[in-house]
Image: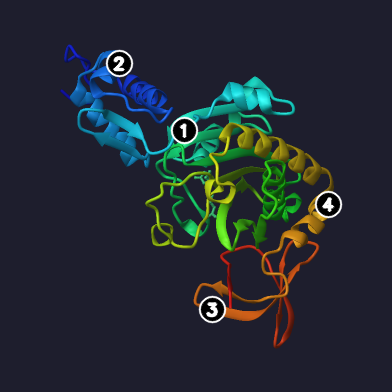
Amino acid sequence: MTADNNTQGMPLNPKTSALIRTGIVEQLADGQFCSGEALGALFNVSRSAISKHIKQLSDLGLDIYSVTGKGYRLARPLALLSKTRIQALQRKAQDEQLAVVNVIDSTNQYIKDRQGQLSKGFACLAEAQTAGRGRHGRAWFSPFGASLYLSMYWPFAGGYQAIGGLSLMAGVAVCRALQAFGVHDAKLKWPNDVYIQHKKLAGILIEVEGQLGASCDCIIGIGLNVMLPSSLTSSDIGQPFIDLFTVLQTSPDRNKLAALLLDELIEALELFEREGLRPFLAAWREADVYANQAIKLLMGQQTIEGICRGVNESGALLLETNTGLRAFQGGEISVRSA
Ligand code: BTN
């Protein structure tokens, strides 16, 4: 018997197996124990098949305990993402503009694969990513139900010339959503990492496709830590991180936060499309985590040190060096405190 057979030993198709795993998470969501036998009866599969599904869910980063004689339980209760609830909480939602999926390689990839069929503002949210992408070609750790993984599609008729500063705008939109959620101390590290208490709360990856001189398609991908597994350490992630559970000391409502992020992103993108980065500069400068501090820029093998003097009108980072004020734009630049 495998996780992909029913109690009669009949093979289940992968879609049915995925539905069973979703069903198991729904059963466990309240944080109470549920036995393997009860779960097996509910989904018409054996206890050993259930234990294999549980193993697959654990491999996706879901914190599940197993206690002999009692069954399975989540480390913490979990409210699953719900398209209906998110759209009910949005200022104005359109049914066909949102996809909420369980497990996916990457929400950015979901958009990329469907680009030609999507309209402006379409968004995808997932419970887990198996190949989440970060900036600088890094992976984005994406355990099940622990964060928000969100990507939005936005084409720009004006092409590459029209998107200068887009990544800074996206950081401001995330900070505004957090403020509306009751989190007031979020800061930005150039170009758009969201920090709280000097630890990373959220990252943004913007992927762009298009030819020079023509329109371009943008995918704005946001990963925001909500309730990461307690066993996770900074060395697992590669840098100090924080989640909203730690900030708020309570389980955050991910559906509410998703609705706020979608609303703020759409509003910001509409304004950015009309007026560019200018209306967002004051908010970005206000949130600048390194303003007037000693920093170093890492660019491949090269390191440049100086005092951070914020950003210029096009969103380039301004660094006061011993050879004068220099502006740095885009590309493979990482910012660190000196
Ligand atoms: C960073 O490195 O700071 C950017 C991380 C961006 C992660 C998000 S999660 C949703 C979307 N899908 C991906 O594969 N990546 C982005």
**Residue hosting label 3:** 302
Q: Is residue 173 left or right of residue 150?
A: right
Three-letter code, disc 1: Leu
Q: Nearer the viewer, mark 3 or mark 1?
A: 1
- Please say if the residues under marks 4 and 2 sit with CB atoms less than 8 Å apart: no
The quarter in which the N terminus is drawn is: top left
Calculate the distance from the C-alpha at mark 3 to the C-alpha at mark 1.
44 Å
Q: Which residue is mark 2?
A: 43
* Mark before the other along the chain sequence, 4 or 1: 1
Residue at the spot 66% in from the left edge and 55% down from the top edge:
186
Question: Which residue is denoted by mark 4 in the rendering?
Answer: 279
Q: Residue 309: which quarter of the image?
A: bottom right
Horizontal and vertical percent position of residue 158: 76, 45
Dot 2 amino acid type: Phe
The disc labelled 3 sits on which kind of residue? Answer: Gln
Corner quadrant of residue 150: top right
**Quarter of the picture holding the C terminus:** bottom right
Disc 2: residue Cβ within 8 A of ligand 1's nearest atom: no
